[in-house]
Amino acid sequence: MLKNLKLLGLIICLTITNVSHAEDADYGRPGEGQRVDDGTEFKVCADQDNLPYSNSKMEGFENKIAEVLAKDLGKKLTYQFWYDRMGFLRNTLNARKCDVVMGTTPDNDALRTSKPYYRSGHVFIYKKDSGLNITNWDSPDLKKTVIGIVGQSPATIPLNDHGLLGNARPYRMQRDLNLPPSYLVDDVVKGDIDVAVVWGPIGGYFAKQSKVPLEVVMIPEYENENVKGKEFWNISIGVRKADKERIALIQGALDRNKDKIEQILNEYGIPHVPVVEGDSLMKTYRKGKTQTQEKRGDAIPKTE
């Protein structure tokens, strides 16, 4: 679920959810045999244990969207599973064991991508019966809570800007595979933390699954205050750079099935907002550099 955000430095958590694919060139391991695509499969590269995105039981929302697209294109839906972390592309897409990555940023330079098909952001998650009223980073109730947050994620920027680091309980960027994908939301339910700040698809889905009623509040965009704290991202489908025809077919299927995709996102509790055309990683990165230069002024060396 989005995934070459390392250019921003601080936006590392998204590289783990769905954009950890930027490190690989367009080939697999030397000497490995490569699958021959006979044109009959819609073969997806996915994680076997990464709800709400995907799992081996086909229970994720990306599994369901892939089903819609494969049916539209008249192809058999198949998978190559691999844990979604460093080496994912090298061992799946670029080894030609599969052809489609269901979630990435639209300007991931390791992939050829579709137009964005949804957009999400970070959310606050807390118990409905907690008495808390949290709508943004200025909400007074935040100052009296323990806040679970993924270390070095974009949301740590506004957390710091609002003097809330002392309230934070940081979590690892890359999930311990001994823990379920729901671990951060689970800690809200258990009372180990009062509020979870988490990427929308993860938070929304597991809050909907929870037996304890939880509030899910989308965090307002923070890009204008500090671009490194950008909360919202467009998400696209990716294929190999050379696969122009494949991505054109996929784009057609996406365009024809917008209503079905919207229904799947809603059924899974995925918080989403309208796609912002032209919003991109590189645009954000350049904007961040400009802001930094403006703040530093004449102190910037001419060779920088």
Image: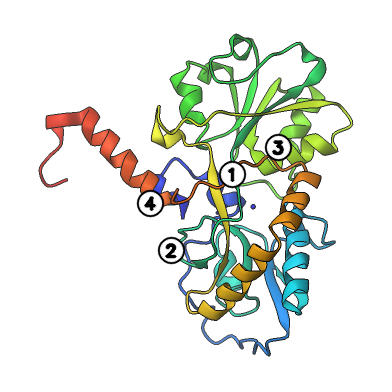
Q: Earlier in the sequence, mark 3 or mark 2?
A: 2
Task: Report, in whole angstroms, how far the alpha carbon at label 3 lies from the one at label 2.
Answer: 27 Å
Give the crowd class for mark 3: few <14, some 14-19, many >=20 residues within 10 Å.
many
Residue 172 percent location from the top left of the image:
60, 39
Q: Say the numbered circle drawn on residue 274.
A: 1
Give the amino acid type for the residue marked by disc 1 in the picture: Pro
Give the amino acid type for the residue marked by disc 3 in the picture: Gly
**Image quarter of residue 295:** top left
Q: Earlier in the sequence, mark 4 or mark 1?
A: 1
Task: Report, in whole angstroms, how far the alpha carbon at label 4 lies from the one at label 3.
Answer: 26 Å
Residue 294 percent location from the top left of the image:
22, 32
Q: Secondary structure at mark 3?
A: helix
Which residue is label 3 attached to?
A: 203
- Disc 1 vs disc 2: which is toward the camera? 1
Give the crowd class for mark 4: few <14, some 14-19, many >=20 residues within 10 Å.
some
Question: Residue drawn at (61%, 88%), measured in percent from left and top?
Answer: 33
Residue 218 percent location from the top left of the image:
63, 31
Task: Report, in whole angstroms, how far the alpha carbon at label 1 lies from the one at label 3.
Answer: 19 Å
Quick one: quadrant of the C terminus?
A: top left
Query: Which residue is more in the foreground, 168 or 281?
Result: 281
Tags 4 and 1 touching, CB below 8 Å: no
Q: Earlier in the sequence, mark 4 or mark 3?
A: 3
Q: Say the numbered circle drawn on residue 282.
A: 4
Tags 2 and 4 touching, CB below 8 Å: no
The reply to whether residue 243 is visible in this rendering is no
Question: Residue drawn at (73%, 23%), measured in percent from left and top?
Answer: 126
- Disc 1 vs disc 3: which is toward the camera? 1
